């Protein structure tokens, strides 16, 4: 390949990686992710505790009776006179006082209770009190009707769907890890799709800004006298892409290190860990219930990383080149007015957003028609295909998707470089998409 | 053999013709002036020569060959609008540009340092570009333009924004290069420099070549047979046929000679009529005057 591309790429790469802002962002992002997830975890556990300062005044006596069997019952009781309590509950350290009047009709399905509070309680708190109290009364009524808890339990039926092809003799492949695999696949797919979406915008706009600056400061006039515009553009794309890879690689190493350090040092570790996983993966914590930590770790290691990682990097580069070449062309067409740029960016942004929103239906049905189409269509595939990887898509789809993507990368670089070479030397003219299409036909 | 030859080169943009059948030749080892008002098509022509854009029709020959993408490596082009990376250090920037011209880091370092020294600027090596004044940056750009020993140098308004001292420095360097055999194309709209520096010129207006040739020849071609004298005593009150007093100030007068009257006849006539001649000089039109006349003549048509 052309030697000048590498000279340009080297400068683009080094000038960015050596910048203080790059080092700061690369270090601060994992630190703030670690601190943020610990903080969220701590807030959630602390917040939950503080909200539970509820005092019950139970005239029926039923709830108190039933609750005495439940060690984890979150509220406390008081026998004092209601009048006294309404005046004293906040001095006693409670946020909320709930009065349950004695039941006149013990079969009523609608019961009324009253709460007293200085501040407006949250809806969540009220609903959780309602359901806790309702549960206890239900239990009481069942006992009164002589329905045995065991009998009641025997009515329950939880169906667990598992993969019929799984080897039951393999201990780590015990029924659970089949579904666990899917849960992790969904999480990983969402994470990778989201990452691709971020990458396209972060590094794409980096390319666009830098092309624009070179044009406006007329550096490009000096450059094109020794480098062909397509080589200049390629060098820039490769250089900035290298910065992206470097940053992602550093994050891939630093985030786990900082996160585990933060969890080890700071309080509130347990809930923080859960909420961090929740934050990142965006799946319901409940779905992981019933799996031991060992199973989860084992399942994570069982993912086909040898396939997922290289293919992810390939799609990272493909998506990056397709979109950042478009951003480079847009940057070359902009004059002083940033508004113009935003107008030209709109179509690109819309395409990326469509791809991003397709992630959700694709993850719910990772081998459906939409998923197959979107992971082959080159403008969507860099976001969608990585998301499908953990679901073992047929290999021919992966290969076809890569081939289509590489062809598109080549085509887009050819196309955008023809716009770029005209745009960077064209001043004062308001660039429209129509105008840019005309540039394609200018002789070289 | 000419080093550069353009034959009916034309470049069209959507709504106008930037270069319209321009043809010219540049002799090796000379300074060639490319003149024209802003927007005349000078920069478009230069971009075709440097293969930044291609012509829609016509041919360009460089050093005897049809112009191709390998040729710009032997050219040095200083564009009119020029910038540098503000955050880069002067040394790094020069090395970067020199490497892009095909020099190795070692050669580039050596040559850039020699050149900086000649421009009394070696201590800028570790400074950032943004710390330099505009004139200083211009010197850096000039160095970057000539660092790879081009045989054709294209300078687009190389003196704008330079103080007289730096201007002279660059001018001396241009002459030095010319004497070494480098051909220089010098594009400008400042005519007095052209008279000083160029042997041949081309005048471009609205993309068209409206005048070209040797500077002296052109001035002679457009001469109006004007002669200026400084004298003592007094001028005759009346003049013979074919002699016209154009301007008269204290002890100086300008005459236009009609057909068939030579400068000697004018002198003889004045001496005979008792004038004491102190100096006698033919007035040739400046390139600036010719330029304005030509451009106005064209736009009146």
Image (cartoon, coloured by chain):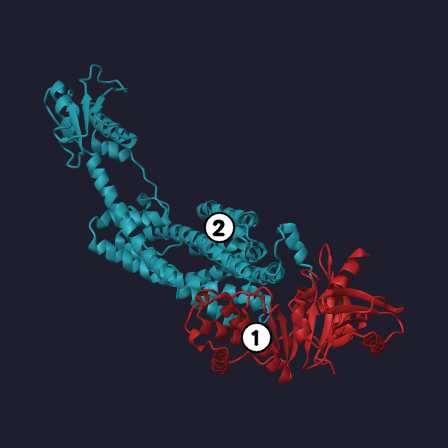
Q: Position of residue B288 (x, y in %)?
A: 71, 66
Residue A244 point in image, percent of width and height: 43, 61
Circle 1: element type: helix
Q: Which residue matches tag 1? A: B168
Residue B45 visible in the current orientation: yes
Label number found at residue A239: none
Disc 1 sits on a residue from what chain? B
Looking at the rendering, in which quadrant would you find the N terminus of chain A? bottom right
The colour applied to the residues of chain A in this rendering is cyan
Q: Are marks 2 and 1 in contact (CB under 8 Å)?
A: no
Residue A142, position as x, y percentages in the image: 22, 26
Q: Which residue is at the front of the view, A424 or B6?
A: B6
Question: Which lettered chain is shown in red?
Answer: B
Vertical position of residue A247 compared to residue B119: above or below:
above
Residue appearing at x 47%, y 78% in the figure: B120
Q: Classify residue A229 as left or right of residue A38.
A: right
Placement of A100 over or under A234, stated as above or below: above
Instruction: Tell which subunit mark 2 falls on.
Output: A
Disc 2 vs disc 1: which is toward the camera?
Answer: 1
Same chain check for tags 2 and 1: no
Q: Which residue is mark 2?
A: A367
Q: Residue at x 28, y 19 (%)?
A: A110
Near-viewer residue (A323 or B132): B132
Task: State which quadrant residue B60 falls in.
Answer: bottom right
- Classify the position of the C terminus of chain A by image quarter: bottom right
């Amino acid at each position: 390949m052309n030697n000048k591309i590498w000279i340009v790429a080297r400068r683009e790469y080094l000038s960015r990686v050596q910048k203080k802002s790059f080092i700061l962002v690369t270090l601060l992002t994992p630190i703030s992710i670690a601190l943020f997830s610990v903080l969220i975890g701590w807030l959630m556990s602390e917040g939950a505790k503080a909200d539970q300062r509820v005092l019950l005044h139970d005239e029926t006596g039923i709830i108190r009776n039933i609750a005495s069997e439940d060690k984890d019952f979150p509220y406390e009781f008081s026998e004092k006179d209601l009048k006294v309590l309404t005046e004293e509950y906040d001095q006693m350290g409670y946020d909320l006082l709930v009065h349950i009047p004695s039941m006149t009709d013990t079969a009523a399905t609608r019961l009324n209770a009253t709460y007293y509070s200085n501040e407006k309680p949250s809806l969540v708190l009220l609903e959780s009190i309602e359901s806790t109290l309702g549960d206890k009364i239900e239990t009481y009524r069942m006992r009164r009707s002589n329905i045995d808890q065991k009998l009641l339990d025997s009515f329950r039926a939880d169906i667990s769907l598992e993969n019929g092809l799984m080897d039951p003799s393999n201990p780590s492949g015990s029924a659970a890890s089949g579904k666990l695999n899917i849960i992790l696949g969904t999480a990983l797919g969402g994470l990778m799709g989201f990452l691709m979406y971020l990458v396209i915008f972060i590094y794409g706009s980096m390319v666009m800004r830098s092309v624009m600056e070179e044009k406006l400061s007329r550096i490009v006039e000096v450059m094109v006298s020794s480098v062909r515009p397509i080589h200049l553009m390629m060098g820039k794309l490769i250089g900035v892409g290298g910065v992206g890879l470097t940053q992602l690689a550093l994050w891939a190493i630093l985030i786990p290190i900082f996160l585990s350090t933060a969890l080890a040092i700071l309080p509130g570790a347990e809930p923080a860990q859960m909420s961090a996983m929740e934050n990142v993966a965006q799946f319901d914590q409940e779905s992981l219930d019933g799996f031991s930590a060992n199973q989860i770790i084992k399942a994570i290691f069982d993912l086909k990383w040898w396939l997922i990682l290289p293919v992810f990097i390939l799609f990272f580069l493909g998506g990056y080149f397709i979109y950042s070449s478009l951003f480079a062309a847009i940057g070359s067409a902009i004059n002083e007015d940033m508004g113009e740029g935003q107008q030209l960016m709109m179509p690109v942004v819309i395409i990326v957003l469509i791809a991003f929103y397709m992630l959700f239906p694709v993850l719910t049905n990772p081998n459906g028609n939409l998923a197959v189409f979107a992971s082959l269509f080159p403008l969507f595939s860099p976001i969608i295909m990585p998301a499908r990887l953990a679901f073992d898509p047929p290999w021919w789809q992966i290969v076809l998707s890569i081939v289509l993507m590489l062809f598109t990368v080549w085509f887009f670089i050819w196309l955008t470089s023809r716009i770029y070479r005209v745009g960077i030397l064209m001043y004062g003219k308001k660039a429209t998409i129509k105008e840019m299409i005309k540039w394609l036909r200018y002789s070289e | 053999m000419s080093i550069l030859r353009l034959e009916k080169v034309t470049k069209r943009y959507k709504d106008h013709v930037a270069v319209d059948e321009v043809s010219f030749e540049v002799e090796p080892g000379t300074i060639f002036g490319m003149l024209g008002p802003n927007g005349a098509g000078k920069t478009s022509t230069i971009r075709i020569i440097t293969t930044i854009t291609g012509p829609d029709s016509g041919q360009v020959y460089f050093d005897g060959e049809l112009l191709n993408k390998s040729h710009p490596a032997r050219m040095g082009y200083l564009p009119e609008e020029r910038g540098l990376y503000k955050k880069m250090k002067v040394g790094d920037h020069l090395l970067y540009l020199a490497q892009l011209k095909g020099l190795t880091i070692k050669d580039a370092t050596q040559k850039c340092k020699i050149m900086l020294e000649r421009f009394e600027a070696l201590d800028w090596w570790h400074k950032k570009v943004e710390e330099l004044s505009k004139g200083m940056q211009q010197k850096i750009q000039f160095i970057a333009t000539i660092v790879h020993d081009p045989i054709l140098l294209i300078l687009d308004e190389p003196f704008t924004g330079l103080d007289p001292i730096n201007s002279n420095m660059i001018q001396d360097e241009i002459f030095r290069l010319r004497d070494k055999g480098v051909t220089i194309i010098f594009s400008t709209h400042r005519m007095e420099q052209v008279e000083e520096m160029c042997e041949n010129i081309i005048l471009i207006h609205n993309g068209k070549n409206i005048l070209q040739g040797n500077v002296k020849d052109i001035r002679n071609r457009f001469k109006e047979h004007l002669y200026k004298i400084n004298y003592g005593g007094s001028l005759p009150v009346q003049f013979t046929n074919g002699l016209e007093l154009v301007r008269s100030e204290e002890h100086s007068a300008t005459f236009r000679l009609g057909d068939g009257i030579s400068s000697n006849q004018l002198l003889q006539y004045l001496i005979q009529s008792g004038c004491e001649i102190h100096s006698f000089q033919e007035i040739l039109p400046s390139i600036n005057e010719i330029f304005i006349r030509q451009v106005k003549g064209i736009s009146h048509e």
